[in-house]
Amino acid sequence: MYSQDNTATKLTWHKACHVNDIPEDGGGCALINGKQIAIFNFSRRGEWFATDNQCPHRQQMAVSRGMIGSHEGEPKVACPFHKKTFSLQTGKCLNDDNYAINTFPVMVEENLIYIGIGK
Amino acid sequence: MYSITNTRIVVAGNGMVGYKFCEKLLSRKKNDQVFQITVFGEEPREAYDRVHLSEFFAGKSADDLSLASKEWYQENGIKLLLSDPVVDIDREQKCVRSHHGHVVYYDYLILATGSGAFVPSIPGVEKDGVFVYRTIEDLEMIRSHAARAKKGAVLGGGLLGLEAAKALLDLGLQEAHVVEFASRLMPRQIDEAGSRTLKNQLESLGLQIHLGKSTQEITGGDCLEGMQFTDGSLLVVDMLVISAGIRPRDELAKIAGLETHPRGGIIVNNQLQTSDPAIFAIGECALAHHMIYGLIAPGYEMAEVVATRIAGGEKEFLPYDMSTKLKLIGTDVASFGDPFIEEPACKTIRFENKAKGIYKRVNISEDGKTLLGGILVGDASQYNMLLQTFKNKTILPPDPEDLILGSRGGEEAGAGVMGFPDDALICSCEAVTKGMLCHEIGENGHHTVDALKKCCKAGTGCGGCVPMVKDIIAGVMKQKGVYVRNVVCEHFNYTRQELLDLVKMAGLKTYGTVLDEFGHGDGCEVCKPLVASVLASLWNESILQKDRAPIQDSNDRYLANIQKGGTYSVVPRIPGGEITPEKLIVIGQVAYKYGLYTKITGGQRIDMFGAHLGDLPSIWEELIEAGFESGHAYGKSLRTVKSCVGSTWCRFGVQDSVSFAIEVEDRYKGLRSPHKLKSAVSGCIRECAEAQSKDFGIIATEKGWNLYVCGNGGSKPQHAQLLATDVDKEMCIRLIDRFLMFYIKTADPLARTATWLNKMEGGMSYLRAVIVEDSLGIAADLERDIQQLIDVYQCEWKEVVRNPELRKRFTHFVNTPEKDPSVTFDTMREQKKAKEWV
């Protein structure tokens, strides 16, 4: 089991998909309770991340289709529309202070991926 | 107390300058000013673009040429009276009376009555079939007469006359003649030698040119039948367009007792006031600084001067530089400064290349230090540089012939700009000198055009100086001995070219291994697509296999173009723009079935918008079934090879451009490169496929094909340059092979071929040496490498459609087959369109 969540908020874990559904060093989008969540399999770092699928810049549902990478060590994703890049750890936009996205904890258990969403 | 001044302004004349005056006046108006503007126009329509009148025959409509609509005048509170010229001015009462009897009072009267065609008093000018070339109505009459005419002539070989002659060609007359009284064409702009060069060029396009011909009589009954010249010869024609110069329309000014010049023109001072200070004259009716300014730019400047003054500002009309550069039926013609000054008042350098149809002349001051003027025919690429050198009175290099020849044996051009003194004005819009630029580049570390635009605004106005700014950057960096390495990003400390060589030698085929071997960190959205492009350019394997799918840029990732709203557009390849009715029907059926918006692209293909990610494989399955392939509209790769219909149908075509375009498109389809590649093939010199605006363009000649390279449209349009002349198909393909592979191997990421060439040391002559003369001895390698890529081409979509693993990735959600519920559309003209950005 892997979890990057270390806050004390009360989380509900939602099953999202199988690990094979998300390409290595790529992303995919899961529909959870009517909400679109982008899930990233950062296999190069051996880490999983989850964020909003919607980019706040132009309200486009496409963050999961973006390229991931790092900026001075900080993992990030670039929205495919206008290349706003967001930290996968904090959700902060790294090239425009006006924007941020939500991030969610990810848990992997028996090759299934769970997303933790607060109450 | 708050006061509003109400000023009554009457404008007599609704041509380009009269219209520009209204526009400028509205923009200069201050909040406490009210202008009550009345415009009288003689013509029946709103102001239109007279400069581009001849495009009326190349398919433009009167609407296309229109400068302003009826609504524009209404919205701005301008009273517009058309077909109603001013016929009288009462200067005591300060009012005008129009043809229809309208009487309007003015505080200021602006005469913008323009000019009419000058018709020499030759017996017979009144006959049917004789026209002038001035208004849309004139053109409509010419067009309807041309439908029944076979042989046409233009009287007058000046700028307008040659435009009119082009119109006759466009109208499809069997013979088009130009008759000029002077011993040369364009006598106001170019000299005898320039005229000879221009004449040869125009004759090769089918015009027949008669110089030094004085017309005695226009023969015929009611209808003209020919032109009788004083030398006894006769030219049989059934239509004649007179374009022998302009005559300022000063008759109204004369009636009103304003001062006019005996040879025409309303005399004005530096403020453009006539002899009555309440009356101004602007445009071609005005005689300022002892001359009539028969170009649009000074006319607009006059409009600006008067508008500024009436709105309370200060501005004078100064003697205006009449330097011009234009393209006449495909031939560059430019003149600047004093083109005609002769020895011993100056030293003249002339260059002539008859084979290529190029003539250049520069006039240098006696002391050899400054440029006084010059003429360029056939190749005006140095015009901007020469004009700046002339205007800035820049001290010339010791070998001033380099100005028009380029320096031979050494480095090209660069010396030109770096030879300028520090106070030479480079960007005249923002008043930035060479010294300021050198300081910003050398001392403050602004090494790019963008950085310079930010720090000193150079190049932000008209942009005409940007090429010189680039030269200065290169020059300063070179002086400092700095080799500018354009490294990829924080993860790869290499240039694209270095990385390509390394990856090739190591034989790497995945992003992971490239990053392990030559980079560090986790990569990013800059290096991933760059490596993806390098891998594709080296091996041409499927871009979605191995670890390559998630490193592709937004569009390549799903082999389609992501559009507003998150749906995709689909462009099947239609080589050369040729398509059968059956295939057209399939496109229609697919678009109908999947509810797609359809539009014809600029590249002669059909784009289908609004496809859900999950529908892409099924859409392509149907297209592939019908024989379509991927059009790579999403890739930095060959897009389309546009063609005109060529000799199979066109009566002018000299070669089969469509077949060649299809051959070229099929050869290079799927070829991935640093940036997109566009091409075109034209079947004759008329160049309907616009090949000279492409990365590589081919134009048919009587003897073979001319190959042009490194052009592009887009935000910084640049014409392609001639690489090879009259080559056969096989040679043409070999040269393109070498050219494309050399570009792929050496260009910076996301640099189009034009940008690549602009940065190349040695420029076009170096490129020609490498590609045509094989100066580096790499031609065989380049040909072999590109052949390998061509040999392994596969349609990417065919592969996805047949591979369930790849196909599975084309869904919006990983945990449900649902489509993205957030996707919604608006409707427009019976089709869908994307919802506006929120």
Image: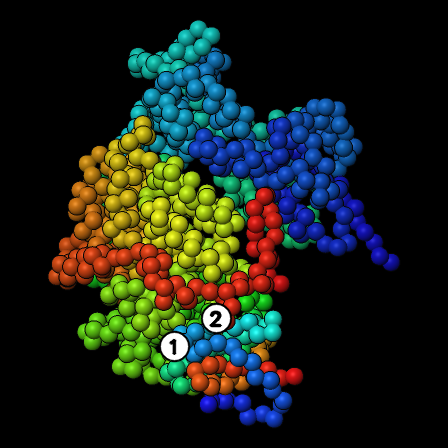
Q: Nearer the viewer, residue B593 or B91?
A: B593
B260 left or right, relative to B212: right
Quadrant position of residue B574: top left
Pointer 2 local density, CA inside 10 Å: few below 14, some 14–19, many at least 20: many
Residue type for callout 2? Val
Tell me which residue sits at (57%, 74%) in the image.
Answer: A32
Mark 1 and mark 2: span between their CA atoms?
Answer: 14 Å
User: Quick one: quadrant of the C terminus of chain B?
Assistant: bottom right
The residue carrying mark 2 is: B814
Image height of B792 relative to B732, above or below: below
Q: Is residue B316 left or right of residue B361?
A: right
Name the disc covering residue A24, or none. 1
Q: Chain of mark 2?
A: B
Residue B614 percent coordinates (x, y):
47, 61
User: SS class of the residue under badge 2?
Assistant: loop
Question: In this image, B631 relative to B588: left or right?
Answer: left
Residue B12 visible within the image: yes
Q: Does residue B532 appear anywhere in the picture?
A: no
Q: How is the image coloured?
A: rainbow
* Most foreground residue, B787 or B67: B787
Q: Disc 1 on helix, strand or loop?
A: loop
User: Residue B687, relative to residue B622: is it above or below?
Assistant: above
Residue B772 disc label: none
Residue A70 sits above or below residue B655 on the image: below
Residue B377 image offset from top left, x and y in percent: 31, 41
Residue at (53% x, 28% y) in the render:
B136
The amino acid at mark 1 is Glu
Residue sitting at x 68%, y 48%: B26
Residue farthest to the right? B1
Percent across and percent down for residue A35 are 59, 72
Q: Chain of mark 1?
A: A
